[in-house]
Image (cartoon, rainbow, N blue to C red):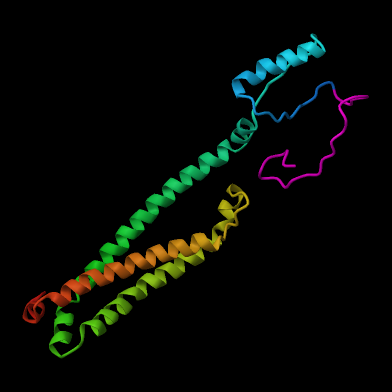
Amino acid sequence: MRERGLAQPPTLAVYLPAYGDCCSDHMFFAIHTTAPTGTLVPMLRTTLSALDPQLPLGTVRTLEEIVTRSTAWRRFTVLLLTAFAGTAMILALVGIFGVTSYSVSRQIPEIGVRLALGATPGRILRLVVLQDMKPVLAGVAVGLVIALLLTRLVATLLFEVTPRDPLTYGGVVFLLVATAVVACILPARQAMRVDVATALRAE
């Protein structure tokens, strides 16, 4: 049972009968009920008074309240990290899209020359995507290495999730690469629709 918090490994426990000699002057009861929470406390007080009017009833909390209190700091920290990570992801996507689109737009004269020399649009599109995806893939590779090195910082905030979760890493990489590919394709397709003479005159 995880009686010391989620950060600690579960410990072994032994449940003893409540009657007979007891080694403590107080007891904890775990009650499973389908009754509404608002009616539970009066019901427990009535039952306890029927057994012994001198027995005091301590704090009554639901299992959800106990779990919520024990994980409040962890959930707040994860919420902040999620907000910062989401903001960083949006900035990264916007940055990748903007820089890649600008890089492709600068290649309009080169695209015009290739079209004038008889290159097919499909070949030009593949060339543009492969050329502009190299720095993106290099950046993703460096980011993955750094992220794997920093997994120890977030390991204590995770519960039953590995800090090197392949689905998370795969999803982030796919999103970044897909954004870069779209940023390459859209301006390249627009550039190939431009008149060859206009593209050759573009600065």
Residue 34 in the magenta stretch? The answer is no
Q: Where's residue 123, x and y in %?
A: 26, 85
Residue plotted at (56% across, 53% down): 153
Q: Which picture quadrant has residue 95?
A: bottom left
Is 94 drawn above or below residue 35 in the view shown? below
Q: Looking at this rendering, what residue extends furthest in the front direction? A: 34
Seen in the picture, residue 162 relative to 119 is either above or below; the reply is above
Prevailing SS of the magenta stretch: loop
Percent of width and height locating residue 116: 12, 87
Any magenta on residue 21?
A: yes
Using the rendered view, name the quadrant where residue 14 is placed: top right
Residue stretch rendered in magenta on the structure: 1-24
Quadrant position of the N terminus in the picture: top right
Residue found farthest to the bottom: 117
Image-based side of 110 in relation to 69, left or right = left
Give the residue at x 32% y 79%: 130
Q: Specify whether 90 is left or right of 13.
A: left
Residue found at x 73% / y 16%: 57
Give the residue drawn at x 74%, y 46%. 10
* The one of 112 and 40 positioned closer to us in this rendering: 40
Position above or below: 46 against 106: above
Quick check: 181 left or right of 51?
left
